């Protein structure tokens, strides 16, 4: 847990350092590049976008990359539904019994283990309540994962709107430069407004496309893993129910008197009565 938290902090700090470096370089080179006729790709796609790209779209891109990396490490089969989970839990039940299942798998974080722990803890031994509790736990875990990846969907939907906002700002600057120049603006003034309008739209689409694509991939992965976990949980609960039923029948059979013991009581009573009469 501490290792994952440390990796997240290092990743965030590294991405923020890259973003701040890009902004500082853009601000320093913007003045130096005013008199130059040729522009580099960095100047065309970062500097020309203005403050909307520097302080809004670039941070959004950093957050998008960070969330994509974090979710790719957290939302995977080896963590949510490792191979052999069903067999491992069955083996624990066979060796230790269902009574010790919670203590043996309580520290696991995969979907099936969490659902079984909550089902056994909340059911009180009732099989129907156990099935409902397991289904509710899986649904709750799925909703938690969906809420985590929803930030990617939010960024993917908002970033084009921010790009459109930059387009409007660029067009306003363009028309203001025309009015200021008395209807005859210089080409450099027109180019600045057009560059802001186009570059912000470019960045909005550049962020939205991968964000929505990654969100769709993670959503499909969560749905598939939760479905497999639900099937495995149902199989384990049925096995627990059969084991509980067989144990109950064995206990009832132990408590019933044998056939040889049943007629012995009346015969003994008749012998005692005859002895009393004599």
Image (cartoon, rainbow, N blue to C red):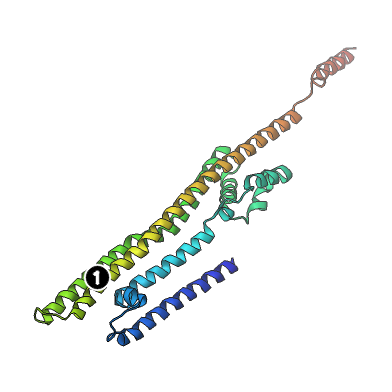
Percent across and percent down for residue 172 are 18, 73
Which residue is pictured at 52% across the width and 56% down the height? 75
Looking at the picture, does residue 244 appear above or below residue 66?
above
Which quarter shows the C terminus? top right
Q: Please tell me which residue lies in front, 193 or 128.
A: 193
Is 269 situated left or right of 227 in this image?
right
**Dot 1 crowding, Cα within 10 Å, few <14, some 14–19, many 20+:** many
Q: Which residue is mark 1?
A: 197
- The quarter of the picture where residue 258 lies is top right
Q: Residue 44: x and y, percent?
A: 32, 75
In the picture provided, is 254 more to the left or to the right than 111? right
| Residue situated in front as seen by the camera: 192 or 64 | 192
Locate residue 204 relative to residue 103 in the image: left or right: left
Quadrant assignment for the N terminus: bottom right
- Which residue is at the front of the view, 243 or 22? 22
> x%, y% of residue 61?
39, 68
Write the residue at 45% across / 64% down: 67
- Nearest the camera: 34 or 88? 34
Which residue appears at 48% of the width and 72% of the height? Answer: 12
Q: Secondary structure at mark 1?
A: helix
Give coordinates of residue 252: x percent, y percent: 71, 30
Horizontally, is 4 left or right of 175 in the view? Answer: right
């Amino acid at each position: 847990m501490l290792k994952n938290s440390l990796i997240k902090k290092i990743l965030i700090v590294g991405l923020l350092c890259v973003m701040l470096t890009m902004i500082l370089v853009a601000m320093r080179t913007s003045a130096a590049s005013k008199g130059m006729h040729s522009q580099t790709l960095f100047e065309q796609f970062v500097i020309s976008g203005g403050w909307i790209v520097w302080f809004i779209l670039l941070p959004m891109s950093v957050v998008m990359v960070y969330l994509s990396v974090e979710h790719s490490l957290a939302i995977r089969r080896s963590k949510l539904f490792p191979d052999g989970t069903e067999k491992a839990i069955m083996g624990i039940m066979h060796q230790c019994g269902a009574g010790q299942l919670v203590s043996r798998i309580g520290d696991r974080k995969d979907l099936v283990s969490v659902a079984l722990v909550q089902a056994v803890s909340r059911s009180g031994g009732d099989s129907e309540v156990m099935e409902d509790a397991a289904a509710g736990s899986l649904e709750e875990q799925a909703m938690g994962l969906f809420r985590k990846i929803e930030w990617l969907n939010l960024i993917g939907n908002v970033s084009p709107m921010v790009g459109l906002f930059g387009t409007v700002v660029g067009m306003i600057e363009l028309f203001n430069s025309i009015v200021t120049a008395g209807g005859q603006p210089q080409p450099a003034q027109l180019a600045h407004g057009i560059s802001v309008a186009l570059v912000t739209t470019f960045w909005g689409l550049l962020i939205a496309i991968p964000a929505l694509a990654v969100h769709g991939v993670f959503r499909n992965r969560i749905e598939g893993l939760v479905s497999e976990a639900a099937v495995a949980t149902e199989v384990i609960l049925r096995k627990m129910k059969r084991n509980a039923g067989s144990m109950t029948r064995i206990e009832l059979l132990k408590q019933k008197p044998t056939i040889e013991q049943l007629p012995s009581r009346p015969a003994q009573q008749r012998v005692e009565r005859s002895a009393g009469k004599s």
